[in-house]
Image (cartoon, rainbow, N blue to C red):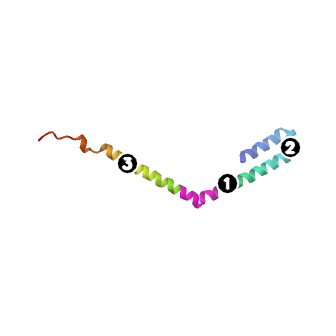
Amino acid sequence: MLLIIIAAIVLLLFFPLLSLSLPILSVALFLYAILYTAFKIYEYIYFKSKKFRNIKQEIETYINECNELNRHIEELKHSDLIFEKSDFQS
């Protein structure tokens, strides 16, 4: 947002003809600031909501279960399987 304001000031300083559009530019910047602030408020409320925390918890549970399954698979890969052993001595 700061970058947009700086760009607007630079344009107004270097292009005097654009100073005629100052009211339009100021209204546009004002609307942008309002929309940006509204979005940030929505974002903050959403990430603090119970719905988001539930989704986050479900994902963490799923990740932990997948990691446990992968560890188990790796253990099975390194274990000696009974059917691979053969005892031909009687």
Residue type for callout 1? Lys
Q: Is residue 31 above or below residue 50?
A: above
Q: Around disc 2, counting alpha carbons within 10 Å, would you say few (fewer than 14), some (14 to 19), or many (20 or more)?
A: few
- Mark 1 sits on what residue? 40
Disc 2 element: helix
- Taking the image as shown, residue 17 lies to the left or right of residue 7, namely right
The amino acid sitting under disc 2 is Ser
Q: Residue 61: x, y in percent?
A: 47, 55
Left or right of 74? Residue 33 is right
Residue occupying the point 84% across, 38% down: 15
Question: Which one is earlier in the sequence, the residue at label 1 or at label 2?
Answer: 2
Q: Are marks 1 and 2 in contact (CB under 8 Å)?
A: no
Main secondary structure of the magenta stretch: helix
Q: Pointer 2: what residue?
A: 21
Q: Residues within 10 Å of mark 1 (few under 14, many from 20)?
A: few
Mark found first going from the N terminus, 1 or 3:
1
Q: Distance between the Cα atoms at labels 1 and 3? A: 40 Å
Q: Is residue 4 placed above or below 38 in the rendered structure? A: above
Q: Tag 3, which secondary structure?
A: helix
Q: Which residues are magenta?
A: 43-55
Q: Nearer the viewer, mark 1 or mark 3?
A: 3
The quadrant of the picture occupied by the C terminus is top left
Q: Nearer the viewer, mark 1 or mark 2?
A: 1
